[in-house]
């Protein structure tokens, strides 16, 4: 049996990956691999690899009212383009919930048919809000009180001055834009502005 040279193996691997990428809805690799492969080579753009469909960018982009949501909160993110679970099954991408989505004993679900997220911590499923079942195609900003009531209820003091106890996160009943990373972060931050936790 003739040994397989490393260069031959590389050519076969490139051909295989290229043929797999050519079957994607978005196929920038159909004409061959670029010089450097990263997540944005197939989906997303620039420094944000999130696809341009649904609410991907609303979750993963920088925000003035919530922490950035990582791809790992909804998907298994591969370390390499040919890892198992990445590009080896037909679209849509599989959902694999992360620790933030499951915080506070939430049991998140996504229904591909209806396009609804349910029981997700990030949308207040454990806090009694009115908008806890958002539609994936809805990319608008959630209104204060849609994830949790103001005040939240469930034994919470009956004050709507959020900043009195959550001074790092809110000022009165508004999210502090400079500390948006502390809102929807899996924790109840009860610090005053002079003792906010680091990013």
Image (cartoon, rainbow, N blue to C red):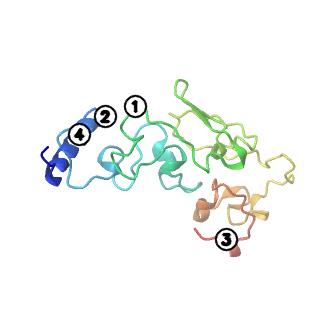
Residue 193 x, y percent position in the rendering: 69, 71
Q: Which of the two residues, 81 or 136, is positioned nearer the viewer here?
A: 81
Q: Residue at x 61, y 46 (%)?
A: 101
- Residue 28: x and y, percent? 24, 41
Q: Circle 4 — which element?
A: helix
Q: Earlier in the sequence, mark 4 or mark 2?
A: 4
> Mark 1 touching mark 2, by CB under 8 A?
yes
- Disc 3 vs disc 1: Cβ atoms closer than 8 Å? no
Name which of mark 3 and mark 1 comes first in the sequence: 1
Q: Is residue 28 visible?
A: no
Examine the rendering and report whether any part of residue 5 can be seen: yes
Numbered-mark total: 4
Q: Which residue is mark 4?
A: 16
Given the current orientation, which residue lies at the most extreme left position? 2
Which of label 4 and label 3 is nearer to you?
4
Looking at the rendered structure, which numbered label has been put on residue 196? 3
Mark 1 and mark 2 lie on one chain; the one further toward the N terminus is 2
Eye-nearest disc, 4 or 1:
4
The CA distance from mark 4 to mark 3 is 49 Å
Crowding at dot 1, Cα within 10 Å, few <14 / some 14-19 / many 20+, comes out as few
Image quadrant containing the N terminus: top left
**Cα–Cα gap, marks 3 and 1:** 42 Å
| Label 2 residue SS | loop
Marked residue nearer the N-terminal end (3 or 2): 2
Give x and y (percent) for residue 2: 12, 46
Q: Which of the two marks, 3 or 1, is nearer to us in this view?
A: 1
The quarter of the rendered structure image containing the C terminus is bottom right
Q: Which residue is identified by label 2?
A: 24
Circle 4 packing at 10 Å, graded few (<14), some (14-19), many (20+), is few
Q: Considering only order in the chain, which callout, 1 or 4, is on the residue closer to the N terminus?
A: 4
């Amino acid at each position: 049996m003739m040994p397989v040279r490393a260069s031959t193996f590389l050519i076969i691997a490139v051909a295989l990956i290229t043929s797999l990428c050519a079957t994607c809805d978005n196929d920038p690799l159909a004409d061959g691999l670029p010089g450097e492969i990263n997540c944005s080579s197939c989906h997303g753009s620039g420094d944000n690899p999130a696809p341009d469909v649904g609410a991907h960018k609303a979750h993963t982009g920088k925000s003035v009212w919530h922490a950035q949501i990582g791809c790992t909160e909804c998907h298994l993110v591969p370390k390499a383009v040919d890892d198992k679970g990445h590009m080896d099954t037909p679209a849509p991408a599989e959902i694999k919930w992360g620790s933030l989505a499951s915080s506070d004993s939430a049991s998140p679900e996504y229904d591909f048919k209806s396009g609804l997220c349910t029981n997700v911590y990030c949308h207040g499923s454990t806090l009694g809000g009115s908008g806890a079942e958002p539609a994936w195609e809805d990319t608008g900003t959630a209104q204060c009180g849609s994830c949790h009531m103001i005040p939240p209820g469930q034994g919470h003091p009956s004050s709507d001055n959020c900043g009195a106890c959550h001074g790092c996160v809110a000022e009165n009943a508004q999210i502090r834009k400079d500390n948006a990373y502390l809102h929807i972060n899996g924790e109840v931050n009860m610090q005053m502005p002079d003792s906010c936790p680091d990013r």
